[in-house]
Image (cartoon, grey):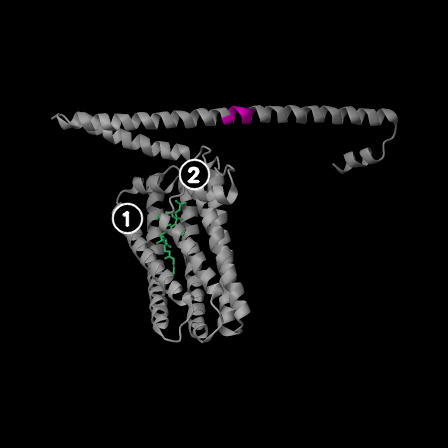
Amino acid sequence: MGEQQMTLNTPQSLTDVLQQWDCLEEEYQHAQETHRTYLQKLDEISKLQKSCSSSICLQRIRLKEMHSLVKKCSKGLSEEDALDEIKEKIKMQTNAFFEMEAFLPKKNGLYLSLVLGNVNVTLLSKQLKFAYKDEYETFKLYLTVVLLLFSFTCFFFVSYRFLDAILNFLLVWYYCTLTIRESILITNGSRIKGWWVFHHYISAFLSGVMLTWPDGNLYKIFRNQFLAYSLYQSFVQCLQCYYQSGCLYRLRALGERHNMDLTVEGFQSWMWKGLTFLLPFLFFGHFWQLFNSLSLFRMAQLPACKEWQVLVCSLCFFILFMGNFFTTLAVVYQKLKRRNQKTKILCYKLY
Ligand code: COA
């Protein structure tokens, strides 16, 4: 490489220059040829994507028709075994289409269309999807550490309304970013429950309301409780990120290996260990949200309370408590139910 550069820099004669130029021309032709092939393949891929999408669409319609046909047919018949088998196959095919679609470009939902416009956000391979999810978890972890340090500083060292405002602004920005990233993850086949995305919308709204709460006696009374809660929440989120990245790495390993039974068991035992460690912290956080809601509600009853922010924040904390508590219970219940169906869990987690 170094030698080639030397010869380019100090040509000995005209023939030398011409020879090198011919060489460069040849490489240029080659690059052009490769690029042409690349464009051709891209064209082929986009045609394949279109035909795949439309055949899935068509099949879906036909499956629906088939489903109602089977329903009608099964009413008057005693031999239902064959029909049950068809019903089961219809279910399996519907699930298979859902997984196939995760690798095909699709129209963005309303939120992504509003935020990003109609840009394609589908990642076309499993590796890219894992990498994006991995990056999402890392982003969450870094931002959580920043928020933890920030609330720690505000709680123990400085008491300026201006710094509190920056903390709340950071929270608004963080939650808004999460909603966008999570919508992209859902487009790519992630099974994030709707509540967690909704949770981030409410949290962004809550932080926005906190940002507008004027500095007064009532704000000062609630300030320390809110900062301590933020500190605790950031700490729990660090634990949660650790658990979720752990799940992700193990699932990736599962996807790459073939001796499924052993590794699925390994994954399950790690997941349950992680969950039993995490759950007490999570539930404590949920009850802290309820406590915040009740404190604010009582504050709103005071005659001195003129700020609308108090009641709105109380309501937001209450919604957060209800949603988080019951969704977490439902997640744990679902996991307990699936505990013995190893392969089902694998299908469920590996999109
Ligand atoms: N935020 C974002 N994504 C979440 C999530 C959350 N709180 N909980 C689950 N997910 C994602 C998972 O990463 C997974 O994504 P994938 O399909 O891309 O792999 C998908 O949703 C399905 O996850 P699931 O198997 O249902 O749960 P899990 O084992 O990953 O996590 C809990 C279970 C209970 C740890 C998790 O739901 C949780 O942390 N809940 C509590 C959150 C909370 O209450 N926060 C406030 C604390 S004060």
Residue beneath the point at 32% across and 43% down:
345
Q: Is residue 275 visible?
A: yes
- Residue kind at label 1, given as amino acid type: Gln
- Residue kind at label 2, given as amino acid type: Glu
Image spot of residue 266 (x, y percent): 35, 47
Mark 2 C-beta to ligand 1 under 8 Å: no
Mark 1 C-beta to ligand 1 under 8 Å: yes
Disc 1 on helix, strand or loop? helix
Identify whether 211 is placed above or below 114.
below
Image spot of residue 335 (x, y percent): 29, 49
State which quadrant residue 273 falls in: bottom left
Image spot of residue 318 (x, y percent): 34, 62
State which quadrant residue 346 falls in: top left
Residue beneath the point at 75% across and 27% down:
24
Residue indicated by mark 2: 256
Identify whether 264 is placed above or below 153.
above
User: Label 1: few (<14), some or many (≥20) within 10 Å?
Assistant: few
Residue indicated by mark 1: 334
Residue with the most extreme right position: 13
Magenta residues (range): 41-46
